[in-house]
Amino acid sequence: MATCCLSEEDRAAVRRSREIDRNLQAEKKQYRSEIKILLLGAGESGKSTFLKQMRIIHGEDFDDEARIEFRPTVYHNVMKGAKTLAKAVRNLNIPMQHDSNEEFCDILNNYKSNILEPQDFVQYVEPLQALWKDNGIREAFSRRNEFQLGDSVPYFLEKVKEIGKLDYVPSREDVLYARKDTKNIVEYRTHIQGTPFMFVDVGGQRSQRQKWYQCFNSVTAILFFVGSSSFDQVLYEDRTTNRLVESRNIFETIVNNKAFSKVSVILFFNKADLLSKKVPLSNITDYFPSRHFVGNPHKLEDVQSFLIHMFDEVRQDRSKDLYYHFTTAVSTDNMKFVFEAVRDGILKEHIDMI
Ligand SMILES: Nc1nc2c(ncn2[C@@H]2O[C@H](COP(=O)(O)OP(=O)(O)OP(=O)(O)O)[C@@H](O)[C@H]2O)c(=O)[nH]1
Ligand SMILES: [Mg+2]
């Protein structure tokens, strides 16, 4: 439009309108070039841990200030874990080895506080160390699939002395093990080799899943997390449903969703470190008696094949291969390696899509 005959006011309006157009174009360009990766999966499968790794590997690492923010979560993980074990010895009728630990179990059973400061945690250090050494607690721990114990509890109980120091600052590894369930949608943006990436982390527990639909637009790829070691555990939410069954059911609805017909869905069979420790001790066929198992249930490769088949068979579109990795989200080296492999595939598909 020629602006020579317009009033000053109209010219300003035209300028504003052109600026809005320019901004819209720029946004559209960025939107198109940005790779959006959605992290999905049941609760405790490792999505937020993966997101922390993306920050460590591709963004700004957690500095002292950021790590100190995890201190209350670590205290909470330790106290809640110890309380859960104390309750379990009672419920399972396991006698404690030492009477003093019996008394501490009573204290823990009534424990309701939320420790925020180091000086409030110090008093628990010695009794916690003694508790964790007690054969009664060890027996309950060996039966942990019968109750709800977070996977990071043994990691933190092993290092209570260090956590109990007044100048304790969580290490990077402690940050990765610190467990807090996700209750909102977390977006993390970073550039990887010049390409803008946005990772979207959601809560996986049942109450959180109705929020997932808000994130379904313009997705480039989905990383679907499975707690692969959870085959002998039931859900935190209902204490009945097998965790692997729940995970497989969610995968089925996601992978067959029309909205994702052009989106690559990559399975992360996570907690591979825990899976390899569990397989020699626990028999997966006890939990899936009606499913056919090929091979030896105490051999890792055979259990892995069983898991792959269980997820693969629910996919309706058989024209594509199933993409999967066995991963350990708490290991930065493993995440670097695995993410590099999936990133190249995702970039290629993204270029094909735009
Ligand atoms: N040993 C081990 N622990 C893991 C692994 N991945 C995650 N964890 C731990 O498992 C717990 C749960 O992980 P999160 O990343 O919080 O799980 P999430 O999928 O985000 O869970 P929600 O937010 O409830 O959906 C944390 O304590 C993690 O440190 C793994 O590969 N190995
Ligand atoms: Mg989470």
Image: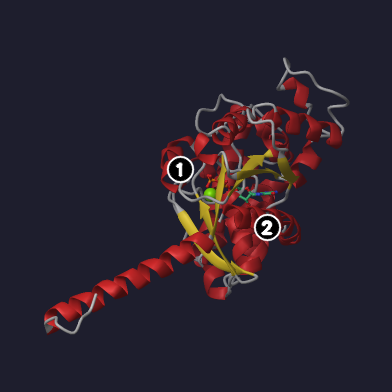
Residue at image position (79%, 35%) is 304
Location of the C terminus (image quadrant): bottom right
The answer to whether residue 129 of the structure is visible from this angle is no
In this view, the residue in front, 140 or 186, is 186
Q: Tell me if 81 is positioned left or right of 344 in this view.
A: left
Res 243 quadrant in image: top right
Which type of secondary structure does the marked residue at label 2 adopt? helix
Q: Are marks 2 and 1 in contact (CB under 8 Å)?
A: no
Number of the label disc, if any, that sits on residue 124 = none
Residue 214's place in the image compared with 187, above or below, is: above
In this view, the residue in front, 188 or 63, is 188
Q: Is mark 1 within 8 Å of ligand 1?
A: no
Residue 159 picture location, percent across and down: 69, 58
Residue indicated by mark 1? 212
Rounded to the nearest whole Å, what is the CA distance between mark 2 and mark 1?
23 Å
Label 2 neighbour load within 10 Å: few <14, some 14-19, many 20+: few
Residue 315 picture location, percent across and down: 64, 30
The answer to whether residue 152 of the structure is visible from this angle is yes
In this view, the residue in front, 209 or 174, is 209
Res 9 quadrant in image: bottom left
**At label 1, which amino acid type do we have?**
Trp
Which is more N-terminal, label 1 or label 2? Answer: 1
Question: From the viewer's perspective, is the residue at label 2 or at label 1 nearer?
Answer: 2
**At label 2, which amino acid type do we have?**
Arg
Label 1 neighbour load within 10 Å: few <14, some 14-19, many 20+: some
In this view, the residue in front, 30 or 68, is 30
Residue 331 picture location, percent across and down: 72, 57
Which type of secondary structure does the marked residue at label 1 adopt? helix
Residue at image position (73%, 48%) is 327
Residue indicated by mark 2? 343
Q: Tell me if 280 is positioned left or right of 86 in this view.
A: right
Residue 309 picture location, percent across and down: 74, 29
